[in-house]
Amino acid sequence: IDGIDIDWEYPGNGIAGIRSRPEDKQNFALLLQALRTTLGNQYLLTIAAADHEFAENIELDQVPVYVDWINLMSYDFFNSLTPTTGHHAGLYRSEHALPRDRNTDSAVSQYLAAGVPAEKIVLGVAFYGRGWT
């Protein structure tokens, strides 16, 4: 084992009936801090993370302090939980997109604007498709 990747979907966000609490925002950073202290620097510590409201529920200013990198999920932007269809892994915003529709470019921009160093962002890429009927 060379490290741990934390995929907590999603701190402080009760999507799809998942139980969450407002203090999960701070608890996530505290978990990463405790893991980094326990693991030291000889093991990797990474997270899988999403954008928009999901990123708003984590302390993006604290996370980069503790992790080696962030696996930014650039997929599942549209899925069975979204009210409209669209490319589930779009690189840029479609000309037909609604204002809050998600895409890879806006996800990366959100993390950079929050102060996450570019060298700590790794794109998670989908090698699958989605369909609607």
Image (cartoon, helix red, strand yellow):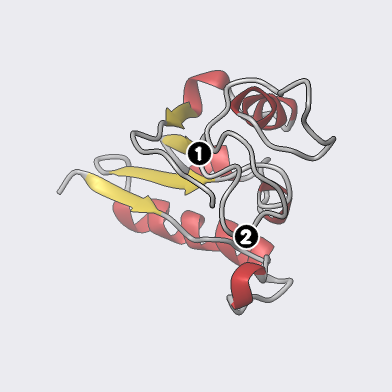
User: SS at mark 2?
Assistant: loop
Residue 99, above or below 37: above
Q: Answer left or right for 11 relative to 76.
A: right
x, y percentage for residue 103? 64, 30
For the residue labelled by badge 1, is the local secondary structure a helix, a strand or a loop?
A: loop
Q: Is 44 above or below relative to 24? A: above
Residue 133 is left or right of residue 94, and the answer is: left
Tell me the mark number nearer the camera, choosing from 1 and 2. Answer: 2
Q: In the image, what residue occupies the spot 49% across and 20% down?
A: 119
Amino acid at the residue labelled 1? Tyr
Please tell me which of labels 1 and 2 falls first in the chain: 1
- At 58% from the left and 45% from the top, the residue drawn is 50
Reading the image, the residue beneath label 2 is: 81
Image coordinates of residue 19 in percent, x first then y, are 60, 79
Cα–Cα gap, marks 1 and 2: 13 Å
Furthest-front residue in this view = 133
Kindly identify which residue carries mark 1: 75
Front position in the image: 10 or 79 = 79
User: Do tag 1 and tag 2 residues touch (Cβ < 8 Å)?
Assistant: no
Give the x, y percent position of residue 38. Answer: 34, 58
Query: For the residue marked with disc 2, what is the amino acid?
Result: Leu
Task: Please tell me which residue lies in front, 79 or 16.
Answer: 79
Task: Check disc 1: other Cα within 10 Å, few if <14, some if 14-19, many if 20+.
Answer: many
Name the one closer to the observer, 34 or 17.
17
* Residue at image coords 41%, 35%: 68
The residue carrying pointer 2 sits among few (fewer than 14), some (14 to 19) or many (20 or more) residues within 10 Å by Cα, namely few
